Amino acid sequence: MMKDGSIVFPGEKVATAEEVMAGEGTYEEDGIIRASVIGKLKIDRKALKAIVQPLTSMPLLLKKGDTVICEVKQIGDAMVIVRILHVAGIKRQIAGEKDGAIHISNVSQEFVEDLSKKFRIGDIVRAKIIKAEPAIQLSTKGREFGVIKAFCTNCRNALIRKTNTLECPVCGRKEERKVTDDYGMGELDKVIKNGDKNKKGE
Ligand SMILES: [Zn+2]
């Protein structure tokens, strides 16, 4: 079971069904309790329930330059569709469901040929809004941007970073992503300022 108060991501394992029941913000699948929203884990020891409290609940307008945390929903040939979950540095939730797109040319400084080697569905990504209207466009160029948490496509456990690859601690599968420098640290509120132009990175 994960520690009470941990920040958890959609799809992340928080406990097993033998330990607690699935409460609000969680679901059970094959005996595993997983978070369905991004938020703070609460273990109700009296009711023996796991609950995930969404980070906040006030509406917020998204604007160009915002650093956001999103979840990958769809991967196409030229575009990744993400759902924006959280704006870094601001303890408020998005008004309604907000989807955005990362065009293949905005993924990395380097040429990207195959988006499925950079992202997978369910990945948690830190991105920057480069255009807010009429549709939200995001970028993951720069080493602060990219996947901050990825899950094994085989068994869905969180992947651990090795030197040049990500590895599943459970089944040993190796996977590739466009990760951030701080992959796996769970840093949601890191705000990346503009003007880091000298900083070259992937
Ligand atoms: Zn695995």
Image (cartoon, rainbow, N blue to C red):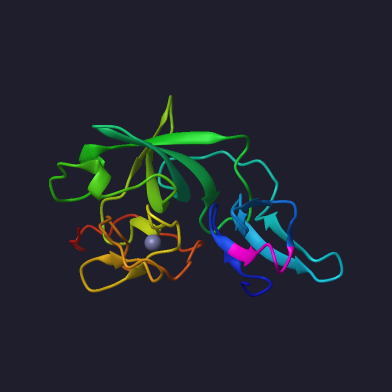
At 61% across and 64% down in the image, what residue appears? 14
Query: What segment carries the magenta color?
Result: 14-20
- Whether residue 45 appears in magenta in the rendering, the answer is no
Quarter of the rendering occupied by the C terminus: bottom left
Query: Where 144 falls versus 120 (above or below)?
Result: below
Total residue callouts: 0
Using the image as rendered, state which of residue 176 and residue 153 is in the foreground.
153
Q: Quadrant of the N terminus?
A: bottom right
State the image coordinates of residue 21 (x, y, percent, origin top left).
75, 59
Q: Is residue 18 left or right of residue 118?
A: right
Asked if residue 107 shows in the view, the reply is: no
Quadrant hosting residue 50: bottom right
Q: Is residue 16 magenta?
A: yes
- Residue found at x 19% / y 61%: 201
On the image, the x and y values in percent for residue 60 come to 61, 42
Q: Position of residue 164 (x, y in %)?
A: 20, 68
Residue 18, position as x, y percentages in the image: 70, 67
Ligand 1 positioned in quadrant: bottom left
Q: Is residue 12 left or right of residue 185?
A: right
Residue 128 is at least partly visible in this image:
yes
